[in-house]
Amino acid sequence: MPTRARGVVTIASVWSRRRGGLEQRERRLAYLLLAPTVVGLVAVLAYPTVQTILWSFQHYVLTDPTQRNYTVANYQQIWHDPVFWAALRFTLLYTVLSVIGQTVVGLGVALMANREFRGRSLFRAALLFPWMMPTVITAVVWRFMYNPSYGLFDGVFQKLGLPHQFVWLGTPTLAIFALLMLAVWKVNSFAALVFLAGLQSIPSEVYEAADVDGATVWQRFYRVTLPMLRPTLLVVLVLRTVEALQAFDIIYGLTLGGPGNSTQNLPLYLYDQAIQGLNFGYGSAMGVILAVMIGAFAILYLRILYRPEAIG
């Protein structure tokens, strides 16, 4: 081999070894920097999770000092608890309807905010208002708005000559409808902001090519916008579903789970059993079931919507 060629090979091999050593050092440094965060997450998340699972198999009632044996009695009690099944049905109903409403309305608002018009900056800033308001305070304000005597909604209906004096929060069907209206109004702004970011990441050349092909507005939306928004849609659905399954403050502030138990979901029932009833074992069992439900929804969304080629 010529001397020059041997020199080139030697330099390349030395550079390769140095580069490999540098990458290893950078990798070790990255692990070292991540270690405190990982330890913190394990301490904050892993221990409570394991403890909750252990409690779910124990007779753990603060007012009953009997032996805390490891059994499946809590899960057997859940299986025969009609209040739990009613709360589970409402949890699923609220999750499906609120997530659909928040996603559809949020996407519509994002499409509006993505258009060119006077006052667009002010409109985008106003999107933050419902989302940044504290949920409990917002729910209490809406509870006054739903009052049949002096509430805003019945007052507007009266001014328009429409039927009014609806007992919004005193009738199960109306209470569910009122709760869903609040949930969609409160959270659609978050979905709109995420969708707006996704819309702005779509290259304009794609729409120009669709216009050249003679695509209509609906075809552009269905064949260009929605496929390009698939990763964004996955993020919105997962985050909103997790939040809806764990909804507590919005329901507690508006209806307290009433009338009766018509708007009581699993988190409210868990709170009633574990915090007010001091039955930590039974509440932990419901918490484990709720966590499994959240994981099942997340896996379902990933299997339906996740496409690695769409992200890459």
Image (tube, helix red, strand yellow):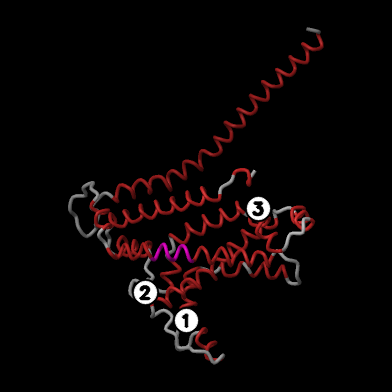
Within the magenta stretch, is there residue 95? Answer: yes
Query: Relative to 161, is 296 on the left or the right?
Result: left
Tally of numbered discs: 3
* Separation (CA) of disc 1 from disc 3: 40 Å
- Please name the predominant secondary structure of the magenta segment in the image: helix
Q: Is residue 19 left or right of residue 283?
A: right
Most foreground residue, 211 or 292: 211
Q: What amino acid type should be assigned to the residue bearing mark 2?
A: Gly
Provide the residue span drawn in magenta: 90-97
Residue carrying label 1? 146
Circle 2 sits on which residue?
258
Q: Specify few, some or many for label 1: CA neighbours under 10 Å numbering under 14, 14-19, or 20 or more.
A: many
Q: Is residue 75 above or below residue 84?
A: above
* Amino acid on which the number 3 mark rests in the picture: Met
Q: CA distance from mark 2 to mark 1?
A: 14 Å
Q: Quadrant of residue 156?
A: bottom right
Q: Position of residue 101 (x, y in %)?
A: 53, 67
**Label 3: which residue?**
228
> Can you tell which mark lies on residue 119?
none
Q: Nearer the viewer, mark 2 or mark 3?
A: 3
